[in-house]
Amino acid sequence: MKNKLMSIGTIVAGVLLAAGPQFLFKVCPVGDKPMKCFYTAKALIAVGVILAVVGALQLLAKQAESKRLLAITGAVVCVMSILFPTVLIGSCMKPDMACNVLTFPVTHTLSAIGIVLQGILFFVNKEKQR
């Protein structure tokens, strides 16, 4: 039961990472030229979809080792969703822009929750393997 709840939480986090910057907690509006946050939001679509697929596979997986490997994959994907706006692509220069005030703090929080969920899944399935 705990595995299913964590997997569903992973799917929800993935969907929110993919759709959130586009619809719910939007990045800065596009002007004459798209800013870095626009491209970061596009990259988060891919990361969120991958995380949602990992969560779906966790629901379908039967073996504890498969669930553990998927948990590692999910954790790496969550770390990547933190690295896109902070290191890899970046965000707007001004700290008071919408992406820096709302979008990326929310996506960082979702990613942190995802990392915790993956850690729980990893260690719960480690106990089952013994």
Image (cartoon, grey):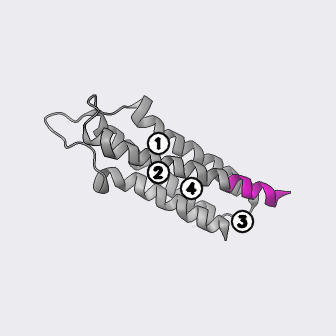
Q: Which residue lies under the disc numbered 2?
A: 110
Magenta segment main secondary structure:
helix
Q: Dots 3 and 1: beta carbons under 8 Å?
A: no
Position of residue 70 in the picture relative to residue 42 (left or right): right
* Quarter of the image where the N terminus is located: bottom right
Q: Quadrant of residue 124?
A: bottom right
Q: Earlier in the sequence, mark 1 or mark 2?
A: 1
Q: Can you say whether 76 is above or below 130 in the image? A: above
Q: Which residue lies under the disc numbered 3?
A: 62
Q: Dots 4 and 3: beta carbons under 8 Å?
A: no
Look at the image and give the residue range highlighted in magenta.
Answer: 121-130
| Residue at far right of view | 130
Q: Earlier in the sequence, mark 1 or mark 4?
A: 4
Q: Earlier in the sequence, mark 3 or mark 1?
A: 3
Residue at 32 percent of width and 38 percent of height: 100
Amino acid type, residue under disc 4 in the picture: Val
Q: Which residue lies under the disc numbered 4?
A: 54
